[in-house]
Image: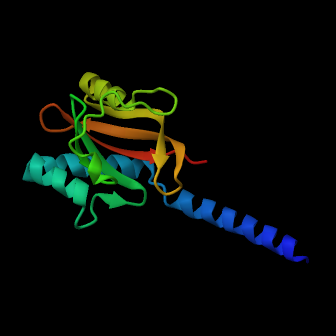
Amino acid sequence: MTSFSRITLLAAIACLASSAVSAADHGSEAEVQEMVKKAVALVKSVGPEKAYKAFTEHPDGAFKHKDLYVFAYDFNGECIAQGANPKMVGKNLLSIKDVDGNAFVKGMIDLVKASGKGWYGPYKFNNPATQTYELKKSYCERGAGDTMLCVGTYFEK
């Protein structure tokens, strides 16, 4: 086998292995819904401020699992918790759009206002693990007052 063939084969194996690992690292729909239920329960038990801090900082790891994390918005579009990127907290993202022009934060808020809970998506979001835009869907439930708590997962490739 030539050096080029070996390198090509090793690259192909590495790609396949990373695909298998990333698929295993995706949270399931059941795990998404379970995390949202736990988030809603925490807001009720300790209050919004302490809960939002736990979602953003996840000191005990309860709200960070595989590629799953909690994010929360008020109904005006202000980010009030973000388990993957704490720098987003305090920013109004109501009009943010994905690469296809989909105002996904507004869409999630509209869904929760109308139904109280449900799945929103698909929308394209930058996956921090792959640094590429991938299809994602999120499950959201109404939180305290005019807020929503969500967890999303990427579609399997």
Residue 70 picture location, percent across and down: 29, 49
Q: Where 48 falls versus 116 (above or below)?
A: below
Q: Is residue 17 left or right of residue 67?
A: right
Q: Is residue 125 left or right of residue 23?
A: left
Answer whether residue 45 is visible to the viewer in this image. no
Q: Is residue 50 left or right of residue 107?
A: left
Q: Is residue 69 left or right of residue 12?
A: left
Residue 151 picture location, percent across and down: 34, 46
Q: Where 14 falls versus 37 (above or below)?
A: below
Residue at 39 percent of width and 34 percent of height: 119
Residue 140 picture location, percent across and down: 31, 38
Q: Quadrant of the N terminus?
A: bottom right
Residue at 25 percent of width and 29 percent of height: 116
Residue 117 picture location, percent across and down: 29, 33
Q: Where 67 falls versus 106 (above or below)?
A: below
Residue 54, quarter of picture: bottom left
